């Protein structure tokens, strides 16, 4: 996986039993993988593997990402270093594939996808596979770097294609919201840019991670609930003035980090409220994340 490196945030779409998610997490323990798998059986296997290996830099969600989901991701400030879409593009409708490409390319500087041979009779979505195999990938009028490798299909004597699309120049996304599907007025819009191998939010260095609030709609299966409760409690400090809310917790490779806090606590601040705020926060987590 030459495109994946240290500290990277990776989205793995259709991760099956987690081969690439697990390999990334073990090879780069300071990376973060957001793993999406819709099949309950495959998801259960992946969860058990992550549990037995004690891996906590993978967040597993039991959800099939749709075009609508990806459109929402593209309109908020979340950003990834690599997106993996291995043997999933032919599961989408053919008319969706082109837009999906465009969305993934604006969300990550590297997109790696595997596509089925258009002639594979046992592969679903043959028309989508035909579109996905189309090699003329552009952004506007500018050609994107595409590296293609082939390997045998597991469904017969066909060749599958692995494409690596890299954005080798700066890219920008503007007028973004903080949260998926939640629109804000112009005072709360954000600009996101990828320059010199780093994402910047409104021109400032961006902490690598994903907002917990933006992951909750996707049925988090791993880490287990107690991990989230412990992390939420540890994320806040008596020495900081914090707005203790789910949307102020960032999921990183080393756990949850609180955002939106003041370094110095006002003298008249009532610190006894902190414990009750954390208890309420943990109660919300109990209702949203499985055991």
Image (spheres, grey):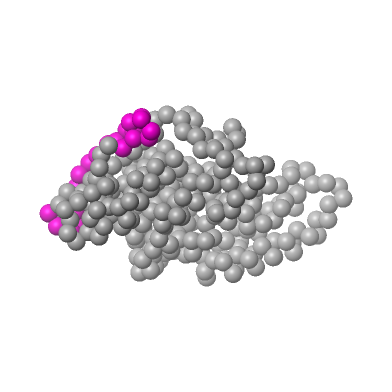
Q: Look at the picture and state if 188 lies above or below 39.
A: above
Residue 190 spot, x, y in % from top left:
59, 40
Q: Residue at x 48, y 61 (%)?
A: 218
Q: Nearer the viewer, residue 176 or 158?
A: 176
Which region shows up in magenta? 137-157
The N terminus sits in image quarter:
top left
Q: Look at the picture and state if 87 lies above or below 289.
A: above
Q: Look at the picture and state if 158 lies above or below 145.
A: below
Residue 204 spot, x, y in % from top left:
60, 34
Q: Residue at x 74, y 64 (%)?
A: 276
Q: Is residue 106 visible?
A: yes
Residue 148 in the magenta stretch? The answer is yes
Residue 89 in the magenta stretch? The answer is no
Q: Is residue 222 visible?
A: no
Q: Residue at x 34, y 61 (%)?
A: 17
Q: Nearer the viewer, residue 185 or 118?
A: 185
Residue 86 spot, x, y in % from top left:
31, 51
Q: Residue 15, located in which quarter of the rendered image?
A: bottom left
Total labels drawn: 0
């Amino acid at each position: 996986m030459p495109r994946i490196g240290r500290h990277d945030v990776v989205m793995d779409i259709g991760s099956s039993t987690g081969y690439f998610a697990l390999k990334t997490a073990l090879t780069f323990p300071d990376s973060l993988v957001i793993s999406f798998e819709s099949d309950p059986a495959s998801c259960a296997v992946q969860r058990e593997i992550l549990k037995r290996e004690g891996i906590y830099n993978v967040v597993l969600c039991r959800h099939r990402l749709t075009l609508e989901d990806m459109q929402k991701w593209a309109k908020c400030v979340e950003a990834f270093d690599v997106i993996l879409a291995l043997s999933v593009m032919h599961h989408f409708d053919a008319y969706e594939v082109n837009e999906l490409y465009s969305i993934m390319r604006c969300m990550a500087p590297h997109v790696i996808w595997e596509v089925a041979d258009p002639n594979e009779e046992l592969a679903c979505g043959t028309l989508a596979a035909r579109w996905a195999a189309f090699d003329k990938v552009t952004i506007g009028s500018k050609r994107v770097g595409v590296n293609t490798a082939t390997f045998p299909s597991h469904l017969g004597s066909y060749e599958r294609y692995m494409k690596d699309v890299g954005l080798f120049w700066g890219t920008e996304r503007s007028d973004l919201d903080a949260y998926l599907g939640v629109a804000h007025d112009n005072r709360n819009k954000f600009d996101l840019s990828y320059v010199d191998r780093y994402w910047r939010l409104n021109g400032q260095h961006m902490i690598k991670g994903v907002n917990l609030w933006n992951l909750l709609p996707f049925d988090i299966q791993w880490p287990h609930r107690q991990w989230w409760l412990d992390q939420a409690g540890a994320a806040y400090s008596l020495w900081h003035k914090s707005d203790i809310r789910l949307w102020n917790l960032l999921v990183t490779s080393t756990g949850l980090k609180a955002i939106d806090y003041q370094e110095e606590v006002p003298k008249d601040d009532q610190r006894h409220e902190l414990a009750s705020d954390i208890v309420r926060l943990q109660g919300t987590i109990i209702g949203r994340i499985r055991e």
